Image (cartoon, grey):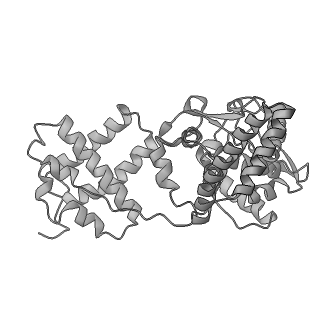
Amino acid sequence: MSDIDRLIHRNNYLIIREYLEYLLSIKNRDRKSVDRYRFWLRHTLLWAMEHPLETADQVRPPFVHYINNLELATESKKKIIETTRAFFKWAKLYHTKRFNRLPAHWVEDMTPPKVQRAANLDYVALEDVLKIARLKIDKENLALQRDQAMSALLFLSGARAGAITSLPIKAVHLDTEFPHIEQKPALGVSTKNNQSATTFLHNIPELLDVVRAWDEQVRKHCPPEYPWYAPIQQNWGEQRFSELEPGKQRSVALNKRLKILEAAAGLPHKSPHKYRHGYAIYGLRHCRTMAQYHALSRNLMHANVAITDERYVHLEEIERGKLLGQISNDQMQQRDDDLQGMLAKLDKDDLHRAITIAAGLLVKR
């Protein structure tokens, strides 16, 4: 039988559709994520074709072998295999009788390829954002003022482009002890997997000043429900806040606007996601305790620190050296502080005696 004559088994299609509906309605996955799963599971259907999925262990070539031979990026192969393994686990749990003969070990043995992360992660550095923040923008150019503030907020928050462009004014809180934004779908924010979180900003005064300047202006002219990254309308060279409904491709527009801003600062173009990487790298460089590391991971809206660790494990070698060197410096500083505290408790006579004793010990050594 030729490939043209072969057809996808109808029951396979129906159970895949049931699984996707389960993810959507029971597991509360967001529709964009479910659409990605649908795309990945399409490869599962094409692999099995007319063979029932409950006999998947008998299909040749084996699934992992089949996927690994496709001309796809390693990351895509990994996602396809992981998603398919999750599907079969669900099938054995929710359709026990039908999938009873499919060996559990066969499902567990579906091992995705390892993705080699780039040794040097591309990201926006603090110095680059400061260059943008120091650009002199014409007071009449509202759009460029907005973009300048957004580049600063991207770096300070680490928010994804889809979330930050859908962030309403009322979700931005700058006049508090700890400035933060609310990345919450309940407020209309479009987040990955429909996650909800309060995200605290890095404490970088110069960037916060730029963000506050725009925040004050946008609050003066727009209602609290309006996007903080407000649409700007231009007529005959004059710019004003638009009353039109914001477009659906605002993250794409943000990417284009950043390109203009970066060119003005003499910088190469980097996507909004590179600002997120910059946020993470800056945070990792300044973490001194596990509590700080956990806080950074939660601010990135990662499910756990293992995800943060995996994503940023290739922090440059020179940076790792600095961080590890800092451990010794911190310990030395702690000993100095302890000694200083002890000496501060001595009166003048005892302090002179201590100096004499210390000098004697140094001579002996």
Q: Residue at 80% of width from left, 63% of height from top?
A: 265
Q: Residue at 45% of width from left, 47% of height from top?
A: 306
Q: Could you tell me if residue 353 is visible in this image?
A: yes
Q: Is residue 107 left or right of residue 279?
A: left
The vertical placement of 141 against 349, above or below, is: below
Residue 250 image point, x, y percent: 64, 48
Please name whichever residue, 252 or 258, is drawn nearer the observer in this view of the structure: 258
The vertical placement of 87 against 70, above or below, is: above
Which image quadrant for residue 293? Answer: top right
Please name whichever residue, 355 or 258, is drawn nearer the observer in this view of the structure: 355
Q: Is residue 342 left or right of residue 307?
A: right
Q: Could you tell me if residue 51 is visible in this image?
A: no
Q: How many marks?
A: 0
Residue 118 image point, x, y percent: 51, 66
Quadrant of the image for the N terminus?
Answer: bottom left
Which image quadrant for residue 321? Answer: bottom right
Residue 212 image point, x, y percent: 81, 39
Residue farthest toward the right in the current orientation of the protein:
139
